Image: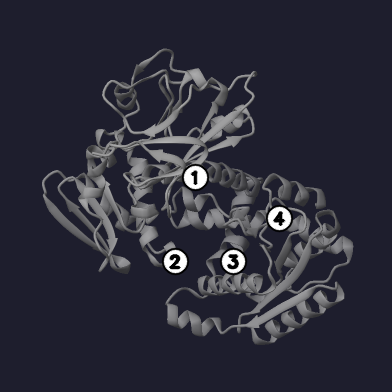
Amino acid sequence: MLNQVRQTIESHSMLKRGDHLVVAVSGGPDSVALLHILARLRNEYQLHLTTAHLHHGLRTGEADRDEAFVRRLSAEMGIACVCRRADVRALQRKSGRSLEETGREERYRFLQAAAERCGAMKIAVGHHRDDQAETVLLHLLRGSGMGGLRGILPVRDGRIIRPLLNVGRTEILEFLRNEGIPYMTDSSNESIMFLRNRIRNELIPELTSRYNPRLIEALCRMADLFRREDHYLREVVRQTIGGWAAGGDFGNVAIPLAEFRALHEAIQGRIMKCLLESAAPSQNGIGCRNIESVLILARRDDCQYLSLDLPFGIVVERERGILRIRKRGERRVGRKRIERATTSRYEYKVEIPTTVYLDEIGLMVRLEWSAKPTLNEMLRRPEIGFMDYDRLVLPLVLRNMRPGDRINPLGLGGTKKLNEYFIDRKIAATRRREIPLLVDAESIVWIGGERISERVRITEKTRRVLKAGISSGTYCGSPMGSERVPGSQK
């Protein structure tokens, strides 16, 4: 089991040498096993460990016992311990959420605070393979989409790690038994009051015995597939809406409807989910009906102006060819921002390395030296341009498209007009003049976020690599290593 945990840590880059970890320890078998395993890996990774325990104010007698056990266990192992008490039932009455959900939120809030208090960079929790299967079934019963069916993430927010995620409950109990390690039991885990307990104690045994003896493994494999595909689609959505959001604020967006309606309906739904959740508190609480209402509004052809009021004070407005999403009372993102790329012309001379903020389109372009990428790196990040610097013909200029522009796109065989390339890629006319181009003395060498020229592709003979990328955001001051060409803005 130690080797399995080590493999999980390495495959998801959970730890680096010298990390300080807060280990969430309830006193139950999963968290106790996690603490002992991390203690055994302590020298290998040069870890500094702190345990954290939250007393939920429920199961008073058992909870007091669990807290005392965690304090004693931590002291015996020479590990600092942080404990806190909370009245989860009182918090639940205020929030209106379920007791289970309120307890979970309060637990993670405590763990984050404990990590801040002791200066830890990571938080380790004891979710395992059976928890993953239960979570996937729970979300399936609730009708979740891919985001729910991806289950529990191995690493969340770059901080919360789950080293036991590929280990089963049976293996954990066997490990504790063989090593003679004591742990506490929680009587509430048997209560049929909680849906997760009914799934664990009734549904999974029934499905395993009558339908698939390897059900746990099948559900975890499915979750892993959904996790990978969901990660890719989230990146597609992020790149798509990056050019619409004012200053990177996804909660206050103006969307050109012609461009939005040209997208596949699956991406349309994901975009709306992302934007509406960005405007909601805790990025949560947006339902399928809210998303579908906005999509219906976006697809209608029989209106000049319509508005829709959604939960959390979110306002969606459709006016002519624009769909706006904002919080009630916030300034509307104007039509001018969407149309300015069709009327603005920009051009910057650049040297390497440099970061250029293109105020005309609200995007940042970074040009920097890079190690020679592998083929997998280039395929995984197609929006990043990796170019053979020695094939460039200086000077370099960042600008938007001009009449007659042509490019020899990598892998497409031959030169074509830039406008034809955009048409083939189904890039709306309203966006084409927004896309930055890197141009040398001969031709376009990079279409920002899209493709490089065949002429500057990476080969075995490449010695120096130029890396180009785009991000949203603001930049204070003048672009370093760049110079606006006089008369370039009209």
What's the residue at 74%, 73% (across, down)?
27
The reply to whether the C-beta atoms of the residues labelled 4 and 2 are less than 8 Å apart is no
Front in this rendered view, residue 112 or 478: 478
Cα distance between the residues tagged 4 and 2: 26 Å
Q: Which residue is mark 2?
A: 282
Q: Which mark is residue 230?
A: 1
Q: Position of residue 341 (x, y in %)?
A: 27, 40
Q: Kindly indicate the quadrant of the structure image that contains residue 375.
A: top right
- In the displayed structure, would residue 352 be above or below residue 213? above
Q: Quick check: 97 left or right of 225?
A: left
Q: Residue at x 70, y 67 (%)?
A: 22
Q: Which mark is first along the chain, 3 or 2? A: 3
The mark nearer the N terminus, 1 or 4, is 4
Question: Of tags 3 and 1, which is closer to the observer?
Answer: 1
What residue is disc 3 on?
Answer: 197
Specify the label residue 480 is tagged with.
Answer: none
Which of the two discs, 3 and 1, labels the residue nearer the N terminus?
3
- Figure quadrant of the C terminus: top left
Q: Position of residue 330 (x, y in %)?
A: 27, 65
Give the labeled residue for mark 4.
163
- In front: 25, or 187? 25
Amino acid at the residue labelled 4? Pro
Residue at the top extreme, as displayed: 414
Q: Nearer the viewer, mark 3 or mark 4?
A: 4
Counting every numbered tag in the picture gives: 4
* Measured Cα–Cα span from mark 3 to mark 1: 27 Å
Q: Give the x, y percent position of residue 150.
A: 53, 49
Say whether marks 3 and 1 touch (CB < 8 Å). no
Residue 131, picture quadrant: bottom right
The amino acid type, in three-letter code, at marker 2 is Ser
